[in-house]
Amino acid sequence: MLQIASSQSPVGSIIFACIALTLLSVVVLLILRRYLPLRTTPAYLLVPVFFGLWLPASIVLLVPIDLASNASPDDEAIRGIWLPHRALLVAWRISYWLTFVLTWFIFPIFAEYSDAGYREPKDRLIYSLHQNAQYYAIVLGSGIIGLVYFFIAYEPSFTSVKGLIMALAYCWGLVLAIYLMGHGLVAIPRNLVRNASASARLRRLQSRAPKLYENMEDAILNLEDLEFQVAELSKRKTGSARDFQDWIEELSDICSIPETRPRSAIPRENDGRIVPAVITEKYLADLTRQLIRAKHAKSRYVDEWDRLLYAASRTQAILDSSASKKLDFGRASPSSSMLERLTILTPYTRYLLHRQIIPYLRIFFGAFLGLASICITWSELVKGAFPSLSVIRFTVVHHWTGESGRVGFAGQLIAAFWILYMCAAALHTVTEVKVWRGRALVRRNTAHESAFWYAGQVARLSVPLSYNFITFLSPKIYEKTVFYQLLGQYINLTPLGDWFDNLFPILVLLPVLATLFGLYGKVKRFFGFGVDIVDDEEDESSAGYGTGSWREGRVLIERELNGTSISRRLEEAASRTASGRAQPILTVPSARAEGSRTPFATSPSQRDLSARATTTRGRAAAPTLPEPEDDNFFTSLGHRFKNTIDTMDTPKWIQDIGDGFKKPKWMGGDDNEASGSGSGSGAGDSDIRRWFGGDGRIRL
């Protein structure tokens, strides 16, 4: 392939580019198949989202080809994959302007269109345009300010207007990309290194379990309340509800509420969800929108909970295999992929793979990507002041001729790696960031609005990150590219744009330091409140009693895996009742006299051992009160507040108040200070009998 690509004709390079684009199309289709049901997803969603992922991927392919295509004709021997100037210009124009239109027009309008809640397409389109009117007003207002600046600095022309639009879109994308990439440059290597230890990985899963389980329960309760409201609405047969009977029946079909299903929370009369006396189209649209969002929220948290249980069970199996040297994960779940269902390895080779090979591979790749993150951060810092100190430029350009150089095939591969890693760091943060409306990527059940939003973020971040990468190289190299002639010259058209492009990427150091040292959690703990932008693992691991610690998560995971949770019992009872069989009486087994069983995936703690020793003493143990089978929301919330207050440590400044007041020597102050306030001897020496004798005994 290298010999073909280095010939005078670009036929080999064109064939290589076509094969690469075909592979990218297959990869994009597999990604869509993972998160969307392709057969039931409408075309107005599949086609834009496909191009929203495929065009950024093609930009990652075009940048290395563009860097190698600017070599002079006598440098054919060192060229990699190259294309003629005209072909590159057409490819860049199609990729850039289609990505621009998708990002700023198609995705926002279609996202609100899919989330409108109305039945008719016309009403949904009007709702979408109305919701995006404020967004476009802000964009237009900022564009007018920039347009005035351009008209003052340069004469009014179509070129200045086009340059303004491209520069503003690039600046907004760069602001978002720098922050997201800075967080991901630390999070990706750190997660690889932390997950190398199976015990530490299991502890983090247990720490995440209480919060995730609570979110899942809240989503289920919210959906049940909305379904109850739809059930009450379906009972309306007269009045204004008669005009929307078809719509109400569609809502009932979406809910599919079985009459025998037990409800865990009955809405009160004053909970704000009473069916109004007059049913309007706007009310039904809002109810449809809330119902669809609630169903996707439940699907999201149930999927995350299932994946957490799956990861916890596999991690526990890996830990248990240390004694027998055999690892067996059991039967694969029906939702497992084809690769997970294959049983090529024996239990012993599987043990060697997961206990001896994969941990070291994670450490190796974590260290490698950590070094790559350092190189990217350093290149961002020195790009404006000392561009010759950039590390990335020396890894991409291998054939130097003075200050200029040529990019070969090896340099193209390395350039593609750098761009992919920068984009992956930014997109990794997008999946972790806490966004409004509960947007999330759910396997085979992603909401349409969420799919449009995530595709829009991919398209928005690809162009700024790609252009930011080529500025790491020498200006004599990237200024000859078609990409610079298309976009870069408009960014550097004014001194303000040039300064912004060179100086703003230095701010990547802020999210890097904030993520590296866990500043999000520290600020939240110091002030007592904070803005939860991203999930801070350090903040989760430091959660104490009353806030959902890893011990509570361990119990939750154990109950779910053993099938003894209350929710699973309710589901089983509902299924039995729906099938027409007699429902048995379910009882919770009482505590055994010989002590509690060791919790899931842990060794017995000191508190458990002391409890067992107390119950096995000669004297009779105190009778245990029967625990309630389940508490409502307010009771569990009160218990959580009580646990938090009871386990709160006394501040140090309050403890130091009594240090300034020392007891007299005749009251045993010196002895107490020597023995310590918490020892038993100190308490005995301060007895009043000490006043009548030296050893504390009364002499007759």
Image: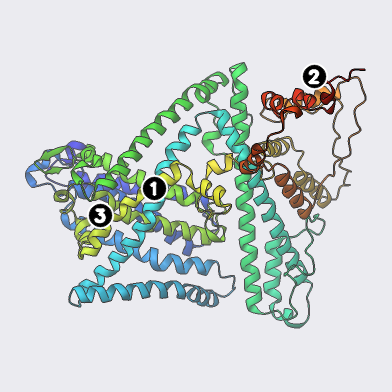
- Quadrant for the N terminus, please: top left
Question: Which residue lies at the image location 29% right of the left edge and 72% below the top edge?
Answer: 146
Front residue of 579 and 418: 418
Q: Earlier in the sequence, mark 2 or mark 1?
A: 1
Name the disc covering residue 397, or none: none
Q: What amino acid is found at the position of numbered circle 3 in the picture?
A: Asn
Name the disc covering residue 694, or none: 2
Relative image position of residue 354 (x, y in whole percent)? 52, 25
Quarter of the image where one finds residue 461: bottom left
* Image marks 3 and 2: residues in contact by CB distance under 8 Å: no
Residue density around tag 1, few if under 14, some if 14–19, many if 20 or more, within 10 Å: many
Relative image position of residue 309 (x, y in whole percent)? 63, 38
Q: What amino acid is found at the position of numbered circle 1 in the picture?
A: Gly
Q: Which residue is mark 1?
A: 182
Q: Is residue 247 visible?
A: yes
Mark 3 vs mark 2, CA separation in Å: 81 Å
Q: Is residue 98 visible?
A: no
Mark 3 vs mark 1, CA separation in Å: 16 Å
Q: Is residue 280 above or below residue 366?
A: below
Q: Which residue is mark 3?
A: 502
Mark 2 vs mark 1, CA separation in Å: 69 Å
Q: What amino acid is found at the position of numbered circle 2 in the picture?
A: Gly
Q: Is residue 221 toward the left or the right of residue 203 in the image?
A: right
Q: Is residue 50 above or below residue 209?
A: below
